[in-house]
Amino acid sequence: MGEFVNDLSDEFIEQRDDIAWHEIRGFRNIIAHAYASVDTDGLWESITEDLPPLKEFCERQLKSS
């Protein structure tokens, strides 16, 4: 997801400011480069709470394309 966010246009990101694009990109960098310092509780929280709404958003975007 983090790499994908890098390919999104500024316009797209600005129009969908309810998504934490900057945090998604930053989280990817932590996972890729500083994985030893990842807070596993925070990771689990992101997986269980943040990813489902993001998945729904992506599915809606794909259907409307």
Image (cartoon, helix red, strand yellow):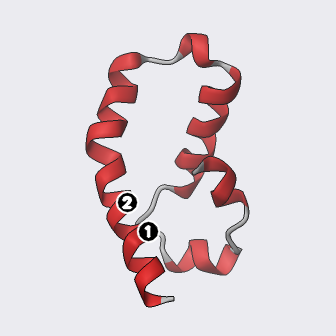
Name the residue at 38% across, 69% down: 57
Q: Which mark is residue 46?
A: none
Label 2: which residue? 55
Question: 50 left or right of 58?
Answer: left
Question: 60 left or right of 37?
Answer: left
Label 1: which residue? 58
Question: 40 left or right of 15?
Answer: left
**Residue 2 placement (x, y as % from top left):** 62, 48
Name the residue at 64% across, 59% down: 5
Above-or-below relation of 57 to 6: below
Q: Few, some or many C-alpha atoms within 10 Å of disc 2 (few <14, some 14-19, many ≥20)?
A: few
Quadrant assignment, res 48: top left
**Residue 64 placement (x, y as % from top left):** 44, 89
Q: Nearer the viewer, residue 62 or 6?
A: 62
**Residue 7 placement (x, y as % from top left):** 73, 65
Are the residues flagged by discs 2 and 1 in contact, CB closer than 8 Å? yes
Quadrant assignment, res 4: bottom right
Farthest left residue?
49
Farthest bottom residue?
64
Identity of the amino acid at label 1?
Cys
Above-or-below relation of 60 to 39: below
Farthest top residue?
36
Identity of the amino acid at label 2?
Lys
Q: Few, some or many C-alpha atoms within 10 Å of disc 1 (few <14, some 14-19, many ≥20)?
A: few
Q: CA distance from mark 2 to mark 1?
A: 5 Å
Indicate the secondary structure of the residue bearing disc 2.
helix
**Residue 15 placement (x, y as % from top left):** 52, 80
